[in-house]
Image (cartoon, rainbow, N blue to C red):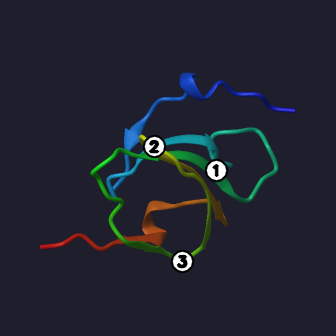
Amino acid sequence: MLIKDINSIPEFTAGDDTILRVILHPDNEPLPIGYSLAHARVKPGKISYPHTLKSTEVYYENTGTGDLVFLCVVNPAWKSEDEAISRPI
């Protein structure tokens, strides 16, 4: 079993402006997994720009007041070259 404290994982802003913490990725963990798992946040009044992946992306959303918080599961694991982001000009 692998247990992680979400607050100990560094945050960064992804290309779609979502605030991410990578929980699991096969490049970072000595685990036989083929997917990646990230904790994501979008602050009130902000958006996540539309994007597409060559792989499958599944979200688990926690709605309510404040930040939109959700988990992203990408299978096979996320790679930057597999993502296209659509930003307004």
Which element type, helix, strand or loop, lies under badge 3?
loop
In this view, the residue farthest toward the front is 65
Q: Which mark is residue 54?
A: 3
Which quadrant of the structure image shows residue 49?
A: bottom left
Q: Position of residue 64 (x, y in %)?
A: 51, 47
Q: Label 1 vs label 3: CA separation?
A: 16 Å
Three-letter amino acid code of the residue under disc 2:
Thr
Q: Are marks 1 and 3 in contact (CB under 8 Å)?
A: no
Q: Could you say where residue 41 lies in the image, as x and y percent from the top left?
A: 45, 45
Q: Quadrant of the C terminus?
A: bottom left
The quadrant where residue 73 appears: bottom right
Q: Is residue 3 left or right of residue 27?
A: right
Which amino acid is tagged 1?
Leu
Which residue is denoted by mark 2 in the rendering?
65
Which class describes the residues within 10 Å of circle 3: few (<14), some (14-19), or many (20+)?
Answer: some
Q: Residues within 10 Å of mark 1 (few under 14, many from 20)?
A: many
Residue that label 1 marks:
37
The mark that comes first in sequence, 1 or 2, is 1
Q: Position of residue 45 (x, y in %)?
A: 27, 51
Identify the element where label 2 is drawn. loop
Quadrant placement of the N terminus:
top right
Identify which amino acid the numbered label 3 is placed on. Lys
Disc count in the image?
Answer: 3
Q: Nearer the viewer, mark 2 or mark 3?
A: 2
Residue furthest out toward the left: 89
* Residue for point 42% across, 40% down: 66
Counting residues from the N terminus, which is met first, the one under dot 1 or under dot 3?
1
- Neighbourhood count class around disc 2 (C-alpha, 10 Å): few under 14, some 14–19, many 20 upward: few
